[in-house]
Every structure is written in structure tokens, then in C-alpha cells.
Image: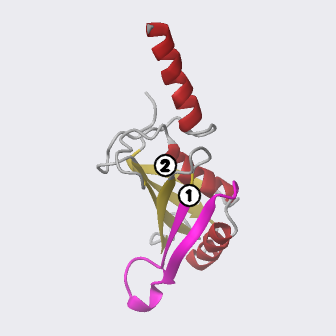
Amino acid sequence: MKKTVALLCVTLVAVWGCQPPDCDRKDCGTCGNACCSLSFHLDGVTSQAAYNKIMMNLKNGGADGRYSYSGGDDLRPYNISASFILQGVHMTLVHHYNDTLNFVLTDDMKPSIHPLGTTLHAFSISQIAGAYCDDGQNYKNLVGFVKALNMKYTETTVAGCPKPM
């Protein structure tokens, strides 16, 4: 009986869990639900160019065809620290769970360190109530999307989705 239960648990994780690669950063309730917050420095790109590329990739479904664009805006006229904001959704491969994605772009404020670049603040949260541990899906949503932009970047974890020990 114990072997059957163990096999069932392993099977459910394989069927419902994150599909590799990039599933090694699970989050267990950092945001009251599973989430991941990352910051990416995008080298050699303006916030306007990054915004356009992110928007088009969301509208075109991203690398796996399961991303969608919810909306975005140019914040530059408001004279605040952020330049652009976007929101999207990612549908998981199995069982079609949706995760909300939020993106904020800021122009690099230290040109002496990074002569040309943009910071992308990226956040993913599971939409399903009770997604206490996400098997790494929120991290995968973000890092997979940014990898598909084909831009040189440096990644920093802000909250949630800790690196495995």
C-alpha cells in the first residue's frame, strides 16, 4: 500500500508539475501563494526597445505559445522611476493553470556602470488559490520568457523562488 501511494504521488508531480527545464526553483507561499520575483539587467537595450520586444513576444504567445498579453503602458510622461509596465498570463502545459505575469522596465540609472541597459522587474504568481508550492513553475514562467527574448541579461532573485541548496 505504501509503495502504491508513493508511486501515485510521484506520478501526480510528473503530470501536474512544472515541465523541465528551469523547474528547480519552487516557491512555497512567499506571497501567500506561490510566486517568483526576479530582476534582469538587459545589456545594450533601451527600455523602449525592451518594451516593444516583450509586448510582441507576449502577443505572439512567447516561446512555448502559451503566453498572452493583458496590457501595458508607457509611464515616461508621468515622470516616475519606471518607464514602461506590462502584464501577461502564462498557461501551464498540463491542466491549463494560469499564472499572472507583471513586468516593469526602468532605464539604467548608473550609466557609468552599465553604459546602455534597462532593468526588467518581473513577477509571476499562481492564479489558482492554494498553490502553496509551485514545483518551480513561476520561476520557469519568467526565466523561460526572458531567455526567449534573446537579449544578454544578468538575473537577480528579488523574492520567492529560492535557488536550490
What is the total number of numbered labels drawn onto the structure image?
2
- Say which of 32 and 114 sits in front: 32
The segment highlighted magenta reads 63-89
- In the rendered image, which quarter contains the N terminus? top left
In space, the residues marked 2 and 1 are separated at their CA atoms by 9 Å
- Residue labelled with disc 2: 138
Give the SS element for disc 1.
Answer: strand
| Residue beneath the point at 49% across and 82% down | 73
> The disc labelled 1 sits on which kind of residue?
His
77 shown above or below 122: below
Q: Is residue 94 left or right of residue 158?
A: right
- Say which of 148 and 128 sits in front: 128
| Residue beneath the point at 43% across and 27% down | 165
Q: Residues within 10 Å of mark 1 (few under 14, many from 20)?
A: many
Q: Position of residue 141 (x, y in %)?
A: 55, 52
Q: Which of the labelled discs sits on residue 90, or is there none?
A: 1
Q: Of marks 2 and 1, which one's residue comes earlier in the chain?
A: 1
